[in-house]
Image: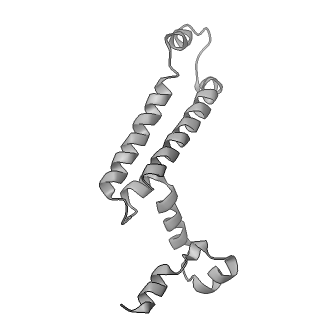
Amino acid sequence: MDTKFFEEYLAPSVDDMAYDDAIVMDDRKYMEILCEIMKEKQMIMNTFVASDPLKGRFIKIILFILNICLYLVVNGFFFSEEYISELYNLEKEDNFFSFFPRSISKLIYTTIVSMVISYITDFFFP
């Protein structure tokens, strides 16, 4: 085999290079960089748009559905009979701005649990 192929294959990514080296080597436009970052970091785009040779689309869709299901299950744990009764028997009118302070702790707990679950699934399926 040609050694040039291996040199290109083993060369560091432009995203991993030092700033000065990346300026010289990188000729991408801003939108190209933004699209690549969105494909990598955003869960929906990573599942349906980004291609990964090691993790097939079917596995990515299964992990995406698993994340959504676990997020909904964890969020469902915070709705108890007392909480629903309290909401039903409210004396004043309920609107978004009264809903937000009641839900901030649930949002924080659910986010932490979903981050832990996402970390665990990423550990098994990098």
Q: Quadrant of residue 56?
A: bottom left
Q: Who is closer to the viewer here, 18 or 9?
A: 9
Q: Is residue 121 visible?
A: yes
Q: In front: 88, or 111?
A: 111
Residue 100 shows in the view: no
Identify whether 90 is placed above or below 50: above
Q: Quick check: 122 left or right of 55?
A: right
Q: How is the image coloured?
A: one colour
Instruction: Find the residue positioned furthest to the right.
Output: 20
Locate the C terminus and report the quarter of the image it occupies. Answer: bottom left
Give the x, y percent position of residue 82.
54, 10
Residue at point 59%, 85% (across, down): 25
Which residue occupies 49% across, 61% down? Answer: 40
Residue pictured at 54% horizontal, 79% vertical? 28
Residue at the location (52% across, 46% down)? 119
Figure check: 51 above or below 116 = below
- Residue 113's spot in the image, x, y percent? 54, 35
Outermost left residue? 58
User: In the displayed structure, would residue 23 be above or below residue 1?
Assistant: above
In this picture, is 59 found above or below 85?
Answer: below
Q: Which of the 4 quarters of the picture holds residue 1?
A: bottom left
Q: Position of residue 72 (x, y in %)?
A: 44, 32
